[in-house]
Image (spheres, rainbow, N blue to C red):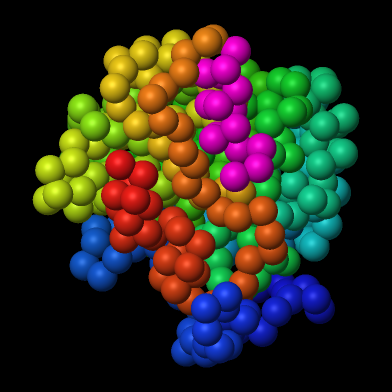
């Protein structure tokens, strides 16, 4: 795994309430002990889809193993392109292939796409509305490797880009459905990719992904959590904990951040009487929370209370994911604790 010379060492920084803490390892899995997982759902779904879609090609910037694209490469070696450590070249090549009638799935880390290749995505792909799918691993706080690899602001960077669809799936069940939906959509897509052994949750709720649609996973009368990505998993877990305190929590999953399903969000918020909490694996600046807040203000729909759960507007520490998630308020216990405080 590539590392920046500016990258922090594998320990937590100075805490506000205590001394520097050491960690034994930087844990990559998002799954709790004993939780069901699926290995490389994106890679397997893309390899399967490519069997019936010969125009699909896969490109990686030296990270196929870490974006699960190696599954596709093994199944379709003649349609896989290794571009090396050159994200701008990756995007430019994908744009050229799209112009020739192919459907490129370009993979890298979210930080490299958002920070290094933004101008190329904007001018070579989005402005021309080319049919390129950009699948990026390590969105938000899904790695312990510090600011060089933590894409805490990628949604904020990409939300203002015209023509670009943004998807933030919750689990393996959803990713398996997202891949063919991306292929069916004509135009550029940015996917916040969960890779490796991805938790499996939404199959228990009979969930079906639809591009551009938000869906109520769980209903409740006291609190409405509007969430995307892995925070929907956290929201569902927190809702179960809060039920023990007789707090009835609804969870509205918003996997498509752009275009936002405004009608469903407004309808759920308008049911009235509920604290509205937006939870996201992203900085509180410029992401789903501010998108929902702007929508509510423009529509004149003001809930009794509105709160955000997200990452702070700062560069985060390196360390073990469970420790970091609890420190920065996106663990299950942290979510439940904050909601109790707000009620």
User: Image quadrant for the C terminus?
Assistant: top left
Is residue 317 visible in this depiction of the protein?
Answer: yes
Q: Is residue 281 left or right of residue 240?
A: right
Q: Position of residue 330 (x, y in %)?
A: 44, 56
| 288 within the magenta span | yes
Q: Number of numbered discs present?
A: 0
Is residue 78 visible in this depiction of the protein?
Answer: no
**Residue depicted at x 52% and y 84%:** 18
Task: From the viewer's side, name the closer residue of 92 and 194.
Answer: 194
**Residue depicted at x 57% and y 40%:** 191
| 121 within the magenta span | no
User: Image quadrant for the N terminus?
Assistant: bottom right
**Residue depicted at x 66% and y 22%:** 187
**Residue depicted at x 14% and y 49%:** 245
Q: Is residue 276 left or right of residue 184?
A: left
Dividing the picture into quadrants, the one containing residue 35 is bottom left
Decide whether the magenta segment is chiefly helix, strand or loop: helix
Vertical relation: 278 (above or below) 219: below
Q: Position of residue 315 (x, y in %)?
A: 69, 63
Q: Position of residue 58 (x, y in %)?
A: 64, 45
Highlighted range, magenta:
284-298
Task: From the viewer's side, name the closer residue of 31 and 91.
Answer: 31
Vertical relation: 54 (above or below) 23: above
Dividing the picture into quadrants, the one containing residue 311 is bottom right
Task: From the viewer's side, name the closer residue of 153 and 138.
Answer: 153
Q: Position of residue 239 (x, y in %)?
A: 24, 45
């Amino acid at each position: 795994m590539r590392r920046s010379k500016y990258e922090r060492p594998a320990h937590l920084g100075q805490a506000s309430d205590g001394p520097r803490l050491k960690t034994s390892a930087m844990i990559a899995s998002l799954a709790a002990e004993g939780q069901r997982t699926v290995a490389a759902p994106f890679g397997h779904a893309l390899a399967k889809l490519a069997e019936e879609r010969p125009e699909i090609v896969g490109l990686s910037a030296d990270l196929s193993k870490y974006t699960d694209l190696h599954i596709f490469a093994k199944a379709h070696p003649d349609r896989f392109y290794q571009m090396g450590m050159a994200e701008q070249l990756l995007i430019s090549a994908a744009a050229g292939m799209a112009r020739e009638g192919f459907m490129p799935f370009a993979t890298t880390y979210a930080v490299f796409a958002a920070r290094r290749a933004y101008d190329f995505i904007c001018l070579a792909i989005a402005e021309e509305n080319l049919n390129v799918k950009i699948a990026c691993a390590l969105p938000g706080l899904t790695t312990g490797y510090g600011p060089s690899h933590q894409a805490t602001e990628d949604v904020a960077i990409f939300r203002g880009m015209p023509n670009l669809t943004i998807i933030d799936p919750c689990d393996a069940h959803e990713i398996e459905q997202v891949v063919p939906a991306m292929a069916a959509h004509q135009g550029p897509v940015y996917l916040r990719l969960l890779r490796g052994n991805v938790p499996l949750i939404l199959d228990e709720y009979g969930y079906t992904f639809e591009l551009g649609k938000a869906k109520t996973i769980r209903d409740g009368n006291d609190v409405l959590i509007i969430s995307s990505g892995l925070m929907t998993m956290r929201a569902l877990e927190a809702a179960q904990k809060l039920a023990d305190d007789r707090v009835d929590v609804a969870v509205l999953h918003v996997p498509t951040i752009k275009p936002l399903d405004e009608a469903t969000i407004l309808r759920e918020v308008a049911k009235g009487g509920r604290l509205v909490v937006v939870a996201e694996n992203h900085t509180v600046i410029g992401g789903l929370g501010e998108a929902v807040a702007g929508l509510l203000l423009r529509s004149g729909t003001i809930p009794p209370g509105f709160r955000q759960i997200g990452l702070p507007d700062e560069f985060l520490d390196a360390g073990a994911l469970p420790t970091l998630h609890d420190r920065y308020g996106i663990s299950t216990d942290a979510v439940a604790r904050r909601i109790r405080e707000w009620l």
